[in-house]
Amino acid sequence: PDTCPFCGMRETLAHIYLECARLQPLFQLLLDILLRFWLHFSPHLFIYALPIRGPTKSRDLLVNLLLALAKLAIYKTRVRRLADGGSCDCGAYFRSSVRSRIRAEFLWAASTGSLDAFEEQWAQSGVLCLVSPSGALNLTL
């Protein structure tokens, strides 16, 4: 379409992924998450992601996965709107996707006895989740 199915503005790639007003709740959520990783959200970071660096490799990989899931949330909610006209909150879709992924990874790690590796990957600084001393998952997102 020539116009955005959410706001009626001229639709470009920049509009779809950066400019549409519907993205503001998602971008606020990303800003809050990234600040907890001591990073600042910007359009440049959103589009290009983080370079993977030695001392911060685990954090950089996790942040890049989150940015990819955010872009997927934008795409999926747009496709749904075009298909059935439904109201789709890309921030809620993103949060749900991340939480589902964390739960699935946790269940796999618990079943294989690799909760330490899970914590290194997903529970960094408790930004997204924590694993209690008893081995229970606590989602913080």
Image: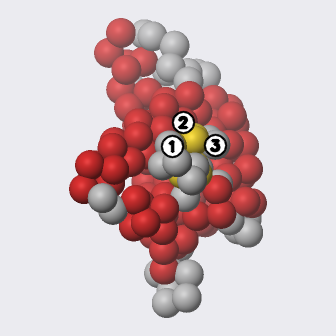
At 50% from the left and 20% from the top, the residue drawn is 88
The amino acid on which the numbered mark 2 sits, given as a three-letter code, is Arg
Please determine whether, in this image, residue 43 is positioned above or below residue 60: above
Please identify the quarter of the rendering in which residue 76 is found.
Answer: top left
Quarter holding the C terminus is top right
Give the x, y percent position of residue 41: 69, 60
Query: Which badge, 2 or 1, is on the more N-terminal residue?
Result: 2
Give the x, y percent position of residue 118: 41, 60
Which circle marks residue 137 in the picture? 1
How crowded pointer 2 is (Cα within 10 Å; few <14, some 14-19, many 20+) is rated as some
Depth check, front residue: 17 or 102: 102
At 72% from the left and 43% from the top, the residue drawn is 28
How crowded pointer 3 is (Cα within 10 Å; few <14, some 14-19, many 20+) is rated as few
Is residue 47 visible in this depiction of the protein? Answer: no
Give the x, y percent position of residue 35: 74, 60
Secondary element under disc 3, as helix, strand or loop, is loop
Depth check, front residue: 42 or 65: 65
Q: Farthest residue in the left direction?
A: 112
- Cβ–Cβ below 8 Å for labels 3 and 1? no
Disc 3/disc 1 C-alpha distance (Å): 10 Å
Which residue position holds label 3? Answer: 140
Which residue position holds label 2? Answer: 95
